[in-house]
Amino acid sequence: MRYSAKQQASWLRIGVSLCLLLFLVLLPLPKWIQWWQPQWLLLGAIYWSLQAPSRFGVFSAWTVGLLLDCVTEGLFGLNALAMAVIAYFVYLLHHRIRLFPWWQQCFTVFVLVGLYQTLMRVLHSLLGDPVAEGFYYYLSALISGLLWPALRLLSVGSARKTAVFN
Amino acid sequence: MLLSAGLIFADTRHWLDPVHEGAGGFVAALYTTTHFPSVGFEWIQDTWGSRQDLLEDNRHLRAKALATAHRLLKLQALEIENLRLKSLLHVSEQVQGSFKMAEIIGVDPDPFHHEVILNLGSAAGIKVGQPILETHGLLGQITSVSPSVSRALLISDANHAIPVQVNRNGVRAIAVGSGHLDKLYLAYLPETADIRVNDVLVSSGLGGRFPFGYPVARVTLVKHNTGAPFAVVEAKPAASLGQVRYVLVVTQQRSIPIPPPPVVLAPAALAPIPIGTAAATTADSLPTAAPLTALPLSVPSRLDIPASTSVTPKMNNLMPTAPPVLVEKPKSALPPKSHVEAKAKLTEVKTPSSAESPVLNHASTPPSSTLEVESD
């Protein structure tokens, strides 16, 4: 029996995976480890907008960003804006990214997460908040890129080969 | 894009505060859920912990309690002495507080934001602005509250600043967070300020948010740059900001009056000992400075001291003898109305009573190398 793409990226699957990623975000870890933590929710958003661009688009990513804003109790809309921008880029490039070999995908994800973090930094400094200095701010982007193949786990249990990881 | 721009704009204008409050409950549920593993782990430890471990723990705690009780006894004597000296200084009230113990159930996911989530909220009487403490020192303050959880900003957050003073000599400064858990910066300290490595910084109580006298940090680096207006001073927070689990929230700070000194000695009859005569300023660098006498008289009437179990009502019983021969200088002896701004190297301030009481020392010590003496 074959599953259609729609079934594979059902809202249930998307919702559950994003909830799991949110719990990873909220794990109470020491601060120094947090610098090494990947941007879990952004990774999820990238994955789903690659996997099912017809379902999970810019607006969905925006909603996920808003959720992150709620959780961090920052200004509403900051993460949402940055996530929407990244989701838009992914939407533009999704045909190409799907064809990349895994290491090239990792690199693309690294660039996308780095772009997201740069955006957040620019937004924060525009609003007058203090921002972190130094390049270890981008450590998180690097780890996100390295962990990208692990997102294959999100398609666990579906019979069909994923569109993202070939 | 426009939507989020609109949201950001609306939020900077505080139009969305009710929405934030609504989201608070949801976020509280999330953090409680993520906290669950550690609760479960603790339960397993409690239930299956071996008898040997528990006995060991018990013995350890009993020894600790004994040591604490011993220190408490000494503290009581000190407190009475403190009160007596304060009443001599005409300090009219002292701050008493009550504490609530809270548990840290989450940390902010952003590594640059030093915020923690506590398991008590407005239902337990937590309010925005209340300071939180740990056994070794100040941790931070409450910044937002929902019914069941609250959020506290740590002193090391780059958005946080706390008024402090050097315990040794009362030099005041502002400790600004750096974004690193083990570092604070002291802002706007002049090159000539008397501050050294290993000086203990305590909260100064200025601003009324943090109570006076809690250890905040220890100075780790003092760097003087010739030509720069301010010295570069770094300090390490006294509290272990990254490791605590249980904290104290100071839920109530109310001022209670201290009665005036029981016996007033006639100042004219006795040889007046000037309290707080500051031999501080070097004469050559400050030729026009008026003598800095009788500073204690111009001390603000409200000094914050650590919250404590106060013994104020019984004070007269505890002071059977006449107070020591510390006599206020009469007001007429004050220097003429002058407003002196002295930028001078601060040396030790010698007051007759400085050896006996840190409070007096604090009161009579000029705040920093910029002195403002205003007499009335």
Image (cartoon, rainbow, N blue to C red):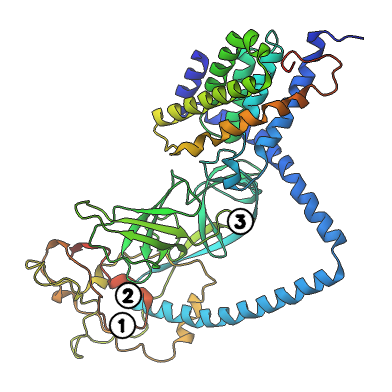
Asked if one can make out residue B283 in the rendered structure from this viewpoint, the answer is yes
- Could you tell me residue B107's position as x and y percent? 61, 44
Looking at the picture, how far across and down is residue B93, in whole percent?
41, 68
Residue A62 image point, x, y percent: 59, 19
Q: In whole angstroms, how far apart are the C-alphas of marks 3 and 2?
A: 34 Å
Which is more N-terminal, label 2 or label 3? 3
Q: Which residue is mark 1?
A: B353
Q: Amino acid at mark 2?
A: Asn
Foreground disc of the pair 3, 2: 3
Q: Are marks 2 and 1 in contact (CB under 8 Å)?
A: yes
Which secondary structure, mark 2? helix
Instruction: Output the chain of dot 3.
Output: B
Q: Chain of mark 2?
A: B
In the image, is residue B82 above or below residue A38?
A: below
- Disc 2 target residue: B361
Q: Marks 1 and 3, Cα distance to the nearest angstrom?
A: 40 Å
Lateral position of residue B181 relative to residue B363, left or right: right
Q: Is residue B335 left or right of residue B85?
A: left
| Circle number at residue A55 | none
Question: Percent x, y for residue B132?
Answer: 54, 55
Pointer 3 local density, CA inside 10 Å: few below 14, some 14–19, many at least 20: few
Q: Which of disc 1 and disc 2 is earlier in sequence? A: 1
Q: Secondary structure at mark 1?
A: loop
Pointer 3 residue: B243
Q: Residue at x 67, y 31 (%)?
A: A147
Q: Are marks 2 and 1 on the same chain?
A: yes
